[in-house]
């Protein structure tokens, strides 16, 4: 174990509060937060006169592992451009040698903060559908997020959604459209080797666990990296849906919605939804009173759903029938 001098610790503390941006076109505007291997700052790009977020390594990295992982995160984001995924603008290094990348500055609230102020369950579920869209897009480009959770989703002032923090993303296949090549990401074409694990450039070796307890799939928690596919993210989406659908004290989650959550979070990956689109479609079907995959219906169940969906029309018909019966009974003979 190597110890850092007091001077080195002082430098790290200073850089964590305000990085040295000399030699870059950026001006410090404030600290936004930190997590994992990096700190995020608000900076102003003097070339375009706009504010952007800058992610910088805030830990000593003599091996270069963290630098490789940060650059890898930037490259992953650059290959999956979508309105629901924060775009990367620039990459470079600071005067002290630490690497950084800049991205769109997102104004809004984290999903766990936003959920407490949501007006209704329907509003929360509609937002969940939006979360599924960028995840489905990333999967179509061969990218797994692997750390989907409420703090990694931002909700903008107009209800827009951005899925953040792709630092532990896994490339499961190369795609021509996204140009994710094995020369850039060693794990895209083959399972990671021991050298990949040491260098940090590739994926994590078998047995390593990356993710957040409570939101990562059982196979991910077991460290089965080579077996992970899009259904690992489906499990995490199910956990987010469970969080958003949490009932108030004394209430129960509606059975059809509970069935969707159960299917998304099935212990066996084969029993989960096949895609994020399929999960979002079931949530939309639940909201619109339509049949859903997760909840097979019999005659009475289908009838009850149709009545609930057309409650206003049913009430009007019943009112009409009652009036007709009353008129018949009270008609002079």
Image (cartoon, rainbow, N blue to C red):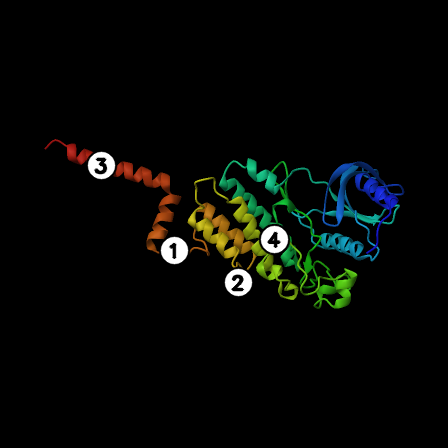
Contact flag, marks 3 and 4 (Cβ < 8 Å): no
Q: Position of residue 76 (x, y in %)?
A: 72, 55
Nearer the observer: mark 3 or 2; the answer is 2
N-terminal label among 2 and 4: 4
Tell me the CA gap for discs 1 and 4. Answer: 33 Å
Residue 324, label in figure: 3
Asked whether residue 162 is in view, the answer is no
Task: Say which of marks 3 and 4 sits in front.
Answer: 4
Q: Can residue 85 be seen here? A: yes
Query: Which of pointers 3 and 2 lies earlier in the amino acid sequence?
Result: 2
In the rendered image, residue 307, in percent from the top left (x then y), is placed at: 35, 45
Q: Nearer the viewer, mark 2 or mark 4?
A: 4
Q: Which mark is residue 213?
A: 4
Separation of marks 3 and 2 at Cα, in angstroms:
55 Å
Q: Position of residue 212 (x, y in %)?
A: 63, 52
Quadrant in the rendering for residue 155: top right
State the CA–CA distance, disc 2 to disc 4.
17 Å
Q: Earlier in the sequence, mark 3 or mark 4?
A: 4
> Of the residues tagged 3 and 1, which is closer to the observer?
1
Q: Of the two numbered discs 3 and 1 on the same chain, state the one appearing first in sequence.
A: 1
* Quadrant including the N terminus: bottom right
* 155 to 98, vertically: above or below: above
Residue under numbered circle 2: 268
In this orientation, which residue lies closer to the viewer: 322 or 173? Answer: 173
Instruction: Label 2, secondary structure: give it.
Output: loop
Q: Where does label 1 land, which residue?
A: 297
Spatial distance from mark 3 to mark 1, Cα to Cα?
A: 33 Å
Q: Secondary structure at mark 4?
A: loop
User: Mark 2, residues whose alpha carbon is within 10 Å: few (<14), some, or many (≥20)?
Assistant: few
Sequence-first tag of 1 and 2: 2
């Amino acid at each position: 174990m190597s110890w850092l001098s007091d001077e080195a610790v002082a430098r790290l503390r200073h850089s964590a509060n305000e990085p040295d941006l000399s030699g870059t076109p950026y001006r410090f505007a404030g600290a936004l937060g930190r997590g994992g291997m990096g700190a995020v700052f608000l900076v102003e790009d003097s070339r375009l006169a706009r504010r952007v977020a800058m992610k910088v390594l805030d830990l000593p990295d003599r091996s270069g592992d963290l630098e490789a992982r940060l650059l890898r995160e930037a490259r992953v984001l650059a290959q999956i451009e979508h309105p629901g995924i924060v775009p990367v603008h620039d990459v470079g290094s600071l005067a002290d040698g630490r690497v950084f990348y800049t991205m769109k500055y997102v104004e809004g609230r984290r999903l766990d903060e936003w959920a407490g102020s949501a007006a209704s369950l329907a509003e929360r579920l509609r937002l969940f559908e939006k979360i599924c869209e960028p995840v489905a897009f990333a999967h179509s480009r061969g990218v797994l997020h692997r750390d989907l959770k409420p703090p990694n989703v931002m909700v903008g002032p107009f209800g827009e959604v951005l899925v953040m923090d792709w630092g532990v993303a896994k490339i499961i296949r190369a795609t021509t459209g996204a140009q994710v090549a094995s020369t850039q990401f060693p794990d895209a074409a083959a399972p990671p080797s021991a050298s990949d694990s040491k260098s940090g450039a590739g994926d994590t070796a078998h047995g390593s666990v990356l993710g957040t307890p409570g939101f990562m799939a059982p196979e991910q928690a077991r460290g089965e990296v080579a077996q992970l596919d899009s259904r690992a993210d489906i499990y995490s989406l199910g956990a987010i849906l469970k969080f958003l659908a949490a009932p108030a004290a004394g209430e129960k989650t509606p059975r059809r919605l509970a069935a969707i959550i159960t299917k998304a979070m099935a212990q066996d990956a084969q029993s989960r939804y096949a895609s994020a689109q399929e999960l979002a479609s079931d949530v939309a079907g639940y909201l619109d009173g339509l049949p859903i995959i997760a909840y097979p219906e019999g005659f009475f169940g289908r009838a009850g759903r149709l009545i609930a969906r057309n409650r206003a029309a049913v009430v009007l018909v019943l009112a009409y029938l009652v009036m007709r019966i009353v008129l018949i009974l009270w008609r002079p003979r």
